[in-house]
Amino acid sequence: MTDLAAFPITRRWPARHPDRIQLYSLPTPNGVKVSIMLEETGLPYEPHTINIGQNETWGPEFLSLNPNGKIPAIIDPNGPGGKPLGLFESGAILLYLAEKSGKLLPADPALRIETIQWVFFQMASVGPMFGQVGFFHKFAGREYEDKRPLQRYVAESKRLLGVLETRLAGRSYIMGDDYTIADISLLGWVRNLVGFYGAGELVEYGRLKEVPAWLERCLARPAVQRGLEIPKRP
């Protein structure tokens, strides 16, 4: 049996199945990237619910795996060379799981780097901007008298949705006919923006054609439906 004792996080969240990938997460837009990817690839894994509302990511056990204190993070007991590997940052985990499974990342070098480009687009732009809209529209930021921050992030989010709208014209998915990690990286954030954040009207989501159709296609996938609920919320 694989021994994960070298990872302090396993003392706080013990592995019942140490031979499987250990997922430490919550169904947030970043968290569901990894649970969806694991469901899509069929790689065996064991999910652990991390209660960010109780600041569990800031405890020493979680920080031992991700010093940045954010979900998701994983331990692969069968990493490169057969050695256990701990990994954080959702984009990096997507790339790792794609390469490990040989799925959802094109083999062609040009298409591969183009797919990665769109994952980076999500990481660098879509996630931070949509997240700020959520803060200033739904959470504590909505109480701020100065509405310029919200206006700024709404305008930028509308622009980013326009980038996606243009990209998806004539395409079923970000990379064309094939669903990839680029779609997985983006779908949770678009879903959250218009759903949980309730910002659809603010960003004029109803004026878009391609993005809503793409999101509907993604959400219809059984693995996506499962991954959106993993791990179970506390």
Image (cartoon, rainbow, N blue to C red):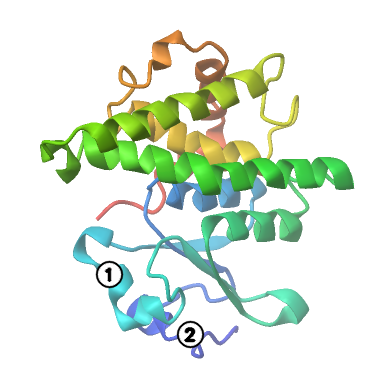
Residue 148 located left or right of residue 90? left
Q: Quadrant of the N terminus?
A: bottom right
Amino acid of disc 2: Phe
The residue that disc 2 covers is 7
| Front residue (pair 126, 14) | 126
Q: Is residue 88 left or right of residue 80?
A: left
Identity of the residue drawn at 49% across and 26% down = 159
For label 1, the residue is 56
Q: Quadrant of residue 114?
A: top right
- The label nearer to you, 1 versus 2, is 1
- Residue ID at (67%, 30%): 174
Is disc 2 placed on a helix, strand or loop? Answer: loop
Residue 66 rendering spot, x and y as whole percentages: 45, 73
- All told, the count of numbered labels is 2
**Where does residue 69 sit, x and y in percent of width and height?**
37, 69
What type is the residue that disc 1 sits on?
A: Glu
Badge 2 density bin: few <14, some 14–19, many ≥20, Cα 10 Å? some
Q: Quadrant of residue 189?
A: top left
